[in-house]
Amino acid sequence: MSEHTTSTGTLRSVAVFCGSNFGVSEAYAEAARTLGTLMAQQGITLVYGGTNKGLMGVVADAVLDAGGEAIGIINQRLHDRGHLHPRLVRHEVQPHMRARKARMAELADAFIALPGGLGTLEELFEVATLTQLGDHSKACAALNTRGFYEPMRQMLAQAATEGFLKPEHRDMVLIDSDPATLLEGLRQWQAPTVSKWIGQPGS
């Protein structure tokens, strides 16, 4: 792969990954509301998991309350349990989580992870890996409310120090505590297209 970079272009839609719980501090919900409101004001469509639970419901409500568009992509099991957000104008039901994630990635120009649990972390690292491999060229970011993603920042730095990750890939996931700064960062982001392999012939 070459060493040039490629920008994401126009930011029309962002997939937001986030917890289906609220966390221990109201600051998490406040940050989710701020992000959702800003997305609506900037004409950015929200693509998310489609439920009304936890921070997922908070960010969707904020987008809708501000007159924006929210697209819910929910898996069949959660839909059958009645977890679909009742205010969504547009939603899709996918058979399972793998199809749900693939559809969200297809609809989104970029990705933001809010604080969350295993699913949120897995979703963020999956789309970042696809960017690293060049399967897509889309910006990935984390909203660092209450320093939630500082351990991840340290882990990525450690992976680079120990020779498992190139600096370009260490730095490609934007991490910031301010939603406005994060959205602007997604617009300006450049995708590294360096090979992921380090010091190996034929890579």
Image (cartoon, grey):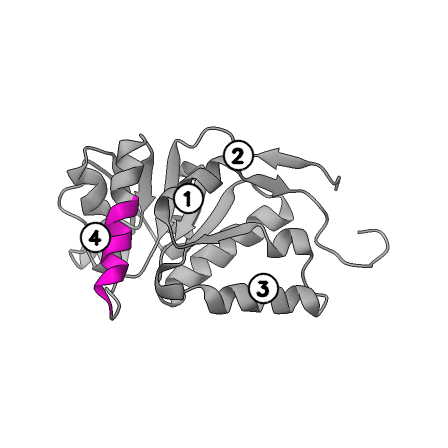
- The answer to if 26 sits in the magenta stretch is yes
Magenta segment:
25-35
Mark 3 burial class by Cα count in 10 Å: few <14, some 14-19, many 20+:
many
Between the C-alphas of marks 2 and 4, the distance is 27 Å
Label 2: element kind: loop
Mark 1, residue position: 181
Q: Answer whether residue 75 is visible to the viewer in this image.
A: no
Examine the rendered structure and indicate whether residue 166 appears above or below residue 194.
below
Between the C-alphas of marks 4 and 3, the distance is 30 Å
Between the C-alphas of marks 3 and 2, the distance is 22 Å
Report the side of 11 relative to 24 (left or right): right
Mark 4 or 3, closer to the camera? 3
Label 3: element kind: helix
Front residue of 66 and 69:
66
In the rendering, at what x and y percent does residue 53 appear?
20, 58
Mark 2 or 1, closer to the camera? 1
